[in-house]
Image (spheres, rainbow, N blue to C red):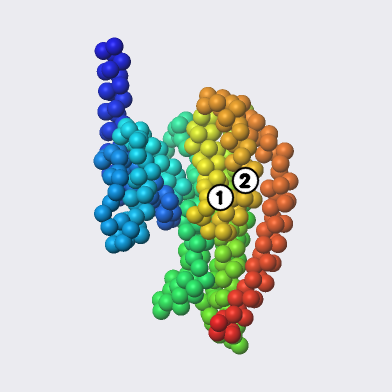
Amino acid sequence: MVDESTSTEHNTNEWINAFRQKSQYMKNWKPGSSPSNRDRLELYALHKQAVQGDAPHSLAGLENSTPASDQAKYQAWRSKSGMSPQEAMRLYCQEADRQLRVYGNTAALATAVQDAATTAQTSGTSNNNNIPPIRGLAAIPLLCAAAAETRTAYLHRLGAPQVRPWWRRQEVLTAPPGSLWAWPEQFLLMAATLNETISLQSSIIAFLPQQVVQSLLWPWHNSFLVLWMGYILVSMAFTAAWQCLTTLLLGSRSTGYTLPNLWNDVVLFLSQTAFSLTESHQPLSARLVGLLVLPLPSIISVLHYMCGPSGHVMATAVYCVVLAATWWYWVLVLPCLSLGWMVTAFFVGECFALIELAGV
């Protein structure tokens, strides 16, 4: 009886410490893309429940003088009534981890990349516990934020006195720059940069006002973001499959990776990233990408459920086989759909150009 009580107290202290650390981290968190109001309220409610317990049954002046945002916070807090502080702490930590995965953390990513580069330069050796590069996946939340830019905001940004071209500053994320595997992504970036250059230089199409040209090409700007997100997901899926296959055949000593790391840190992260695109707070174009690649995270989730947390060999092997069997969808169907999307974007751009030309 004493041992059980001691164990319970130990677990409670662990959750309290984890909650304190996580809540302190979230105070200084700078997400890659703006979290939805629902997610903000969820974290707020769990934090209040963990710290103060149940919300009061009534709040003076709630209906009249209290701002709508405070009313929403109060209602979210009230929805957690009856939940124990320990349970609220546990759920807060889980929700915080989920939002960190969904919305990203640019500062943390930059620090991690810099630390990894420094370690590689100083040691010059590989580690069997290395995690393959996932820079492309980590950039997805930032691309979603860019895709959420409205046409009005896009025109306002391009009309600024000293606008910095956005596409020109982007770089290949899925392969070493200059390599053969980087050329498809490099070609996409070059096309997007050309589209942006035409939008910024009105002299290219002299007979049309600049804002009309920008309205004409804005759907293509958004479409290039869609194509980039889709390419990153598909490219990383095949890269992960290749790394899993070579590790299965040659062993961890040859590849520098282990199957648990590949599955947990790359494949599952890929699945979570793809699923996050289908959430309701994402822009419509990002949700379309999530819908088109939905078979991929669905397959990964089924394999993870069937094989369990320790069945990495079976899960990675089946993942490679399934991806190879469905190559036609990723290599043939998706590019054709992308071409159709670009054609549609051109006609949509014509509509926006006519609206801008008419001054509506």
Q: Which residue occupies the foreground of this view, 292 or 78?
A: 78
Q: At which x and y percent is residue 271?
A: 55, 41
Q: Measured along the vertical axis of the image, is residue 128 above or below residue 298? A: above
| Number of numbered markers | 2
Q: At which x and y percent is residue 111?
A: 36, 48
Identified at 47% across, 63% down, the residue is 169
Q: Which residue is mark 1?
A: 278
Q: Measured along the vertical axis of the image, is residue 302 above or below residue 55? A: above
242 horizontally vs 41: left or right: right
**Rendered-image quadrant of the C terminus:** bottom right
Identified at 46% across, 35% down, the residue is 130
Q: Which residue occupies the foreground of this view, 263 or 32?
A: 32
Q: At which x and y percent is residue 328?
A: 73, 46
Q: Secondary structure at mark 2?
A: loop
The amino acid at mark 2 is Leu
Q: Secondary structure at mark 1?
A: loop
313 horizontally vs 63: left or right: right
The residue carrying pointer 2 sits among few (fewer than 14), some (14 to 19) or many (20 or more) residues within 10 Å by Cα, namely some
Q: At which x and y percent is residue 81?
A: 35, 39
Identified at 26% across, 13% down, the residue is 2
Looking at marks 2 and 1 on the same chain, the residue that comes earlier in the sequence is marked by 1
Give the distance between the C-alpha atoms of the residues marked 2 and 1, in whole angstroms.
Answer: 8 Å
Q: Which residue is mark 2?
A: 294
| Residue 324 visible at all | yes
**Rendered-image quadrant of the N terminus:** top left
Query: In the picture, residue 317 is in which quadrant?
Result: top right
Q: Are marks 2 and 1 in contact (CB under 8 Å)?
A: yes
Q: Which residue occupies the foreground of this view, 169 or 176?
A: 169
The amino acid at mark 1 is Thr
Identified at 60% across, 27% down, the residue is 306
Query: In the picture, residue 303 is in which quadrant?
Result: top right
